[in-house]
Image (cartoon, helix red, strand yellow):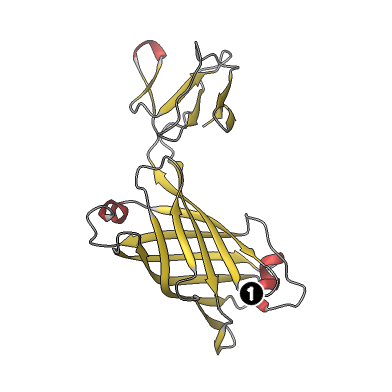
């Protein structure tokens, strides 16, 4: 089965959002305001759209499903980057209430910092800033967690990736071909399955040859190639 048409994820941003106590609207609907000027949105090293911004206002409407097992997120916020440009940062998503995330959302006294993997979001940007307008034409997804520290606001942290097209195509004589120089691809020696690693733009690969069992040491990265 060929998997070359499936999208890939490109690490793009880390968002850290400080939140205030929830406002109860109905038994199944909460509004959680952002702490003004306390959260950040920062691009990952090497991402093609560099960004360093602060959330100046925002809020999350959390709607609980009737069975209480999931909540739906609906967030709209405004951030300002270091040049003074403004952008709208919006997302919707889902959170599984069965784990530690549920303790945080319910306000349980034994709530602690959670891991990633039970909260997922889809993110969109809106802005007229010349250096940031490309954000509007891309789709992003994220995985979130809660960070709990004593005497500090709760932090919602998201690892955000750009959804992008597959970059592996088959060339003449079944040889793989990559259409962008910032990607590295190798072939399995036992099958025609393309194996791929996505590299940040600023990193360079130092390897005499790209062999199927090679482990590439990239500065602080240690990446072994895996199937798409």
The picture quadrant where one finds residue 225 is top right
Residue at horizontal 39 percent and vertical 29 percent from the top: 182
Q: Position of residue 220 (x, y in %)?
A: 57, 33
Asked whether 176 or 131 is in front, the reply is 131
Q: Position of residue 93 (x, y in %)?
A: 50, 64
The picture quadrant where one finds residue 19 is bottom right
The picture quadrant where one finds residue 69 is bottom right
Above or below, 110 relative to 12: below
- Numbered circles on residues, count: 1
Does residue 43 appear left or right of residue 189 in this picture?
left
Asked whether 65 or 88 is in front, the reply is 88
Number of other residues with Cα within 10 Å of mark 1, as a class: few under 14, some 14 to 19, many 20 or more:
some
Q: Position of residue 107 (x, y in %)?
A: 68, 78
Q: Position of residue 118 (x, y in %)?
A: 63, 59
Above or below, 134 relative to 67: above
Does residue 102 appear left or right of residue 13 in this picture?
right
Does residue 49 appear left or right of residue 22 in this picture?
left
Residue at horizontal 68 percent and vertical 70 percent from the top: 102
Residue at horizontal 69 percent and vertical 63 percent from the top: 113
The residue indicated by pointer 1 is 105
Above or below, 146 relative to 44: below
Residue at horizontal 54 percent and vertical 83 percent from the top: 29
Label 1: which secondary element: helix
Does residue 155 appear left or right of residue 176 in this picture?
right
Asked whether 221 or 145 is in front, the reply is 221
């Amino acid at each position: 089965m060929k998997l070359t048409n499936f999208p890939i994820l490109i690490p793009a941003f880390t968002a850290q959002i400080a939140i205030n106590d929830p406002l109860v609207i109905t038994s199944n609907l909460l509004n959680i305001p952002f702490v003004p000027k306390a959260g950040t949105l920062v691009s990952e090293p090497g991402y093609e759209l560099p960004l360093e911004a602060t959330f100046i206002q925002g809020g999350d409407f959390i709607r609980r499903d009737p069975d209480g097992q999931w909540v739906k997120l609906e967030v709209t916020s405004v951030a300002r980057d270091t040049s003074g440009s403004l952008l709208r940062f919006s997302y919707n998503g889902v959170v599984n209430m069965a784990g530690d995330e549920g303790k945080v959302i319910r306000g349980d006294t034994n709530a602690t910092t959670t891991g990633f993997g039970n909260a997922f979001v889809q993110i969109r940007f809106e802005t007229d800033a010349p250096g940031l307008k490309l954000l509007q034409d891309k789709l992003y997804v994220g995985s979130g967690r809660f960070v709990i520290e004593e005497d500090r606001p709760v932090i919602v942290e998201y690892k955000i990736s750009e959804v992008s097209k597959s970059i592996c195509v088959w060339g003449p004589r079944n040889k793989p071909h990559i259409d962008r120089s910032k990607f590295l691809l190798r072939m399995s020696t036992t099958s025609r399955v393309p194996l791929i690693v996505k590299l940040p733009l600023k990193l360079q690969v130092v390897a005499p040859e790209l062999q199927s069992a090679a482990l590439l040491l990239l500065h602080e990265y240690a990446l072994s190639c895996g199937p798409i």
